Image: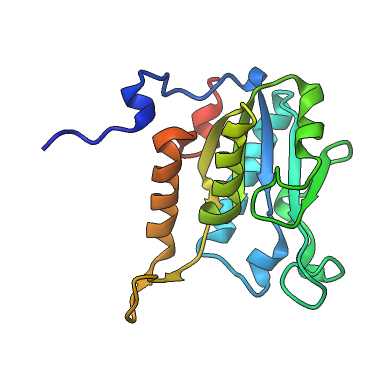
Amino acid sequence: MSEAKTLLQMAGADPKPAPLGDCVLVMIDCQREYLDGGLKLHRVEEALAEGALLLALARDRGVPVVHIQHNGNPGGLFDPEGPKHTLCDQVKPLDGEMVVTKTKPNAFAGTKLEEVLKPFARKNLIVAGLMTHMCVSSTVRSALDHNYGCTVVAGACATRDLPDSLGGDGVIKAADLHRAALAGLSDRFAVIVPDALSLEGN
């Protein structure tokens, strides 16, 4: 049986993340809805702690930071007027850091993200946030269409259990879904690193 390889490996692409000086950090939907709201995620506290380390590294190295915040419907999840809509204290923006709001999983869709990124003149994104299989994946896949390279920090992402779509009483555990979503991204769309420490030498 042949060794499993990603399309990027087959193409001879460099498996290393881009230098920090060429990157913008994009923190996706690190909102209280996922921490203590209706969509509490598996290992979310650990992901936010790793996100805080990632933010500290970016700020120390002068990497621009853009925060993404999801707007839901009034009275529902991510209610813009409700307390669970707010970004978590562990990774809250500093003065001067941009916050881009969105209504779809893909942070480029119908938002000002492309407009916000352009002045930085950096064509690589470091991406972290919530949820791995949903808004992180959707945004990273779209980033390729916008000619951005991506590095995803696995430890700063999290997701939740889902029912098995093939039926029965099966459940896809969050840890398995997280790994599968990252594996899918690594095939063509992103370099995957385990944690913020992996980027310190860049």
Q: In which quarter of the image is residue 9?
A: top left
Rendered residue at 74%/24% (across/down)? 62
Residue farthest toward the bottom in the current orientation of the protein: 169
Residue 15 falls in image quadrant: top left
Residue lying at the far left of the rendered structure: 1
Residue 33: image x %, image y %? 69, 67
Is residue 80 rendered to the left or right of residue 200? right
Is 5 above or below relative to 131? above
Q: Is residue 174 left or right of 23 when viewed as pictured? A: left
Residue 64: image quadrant is top right
Q: Residue at x 61, y 52 (%)?
A: 135
Q: Is 124 placed above or below 49 here?
A: above
- Image coordinates of residue 94 in percent, x first then y, are 83, 41
Left or right: 21 in relation to 95? left
Count of number-bearing discs: 0
Could you tell me which quadrant the C terminus lies in? top right
The x and y percentages for residue 170 are: 33, 76
The residue shown at (77%, 49%) is: 92
Task: Give the residue displayed 63% in from the left and 31% down from the top.
Answer: 125
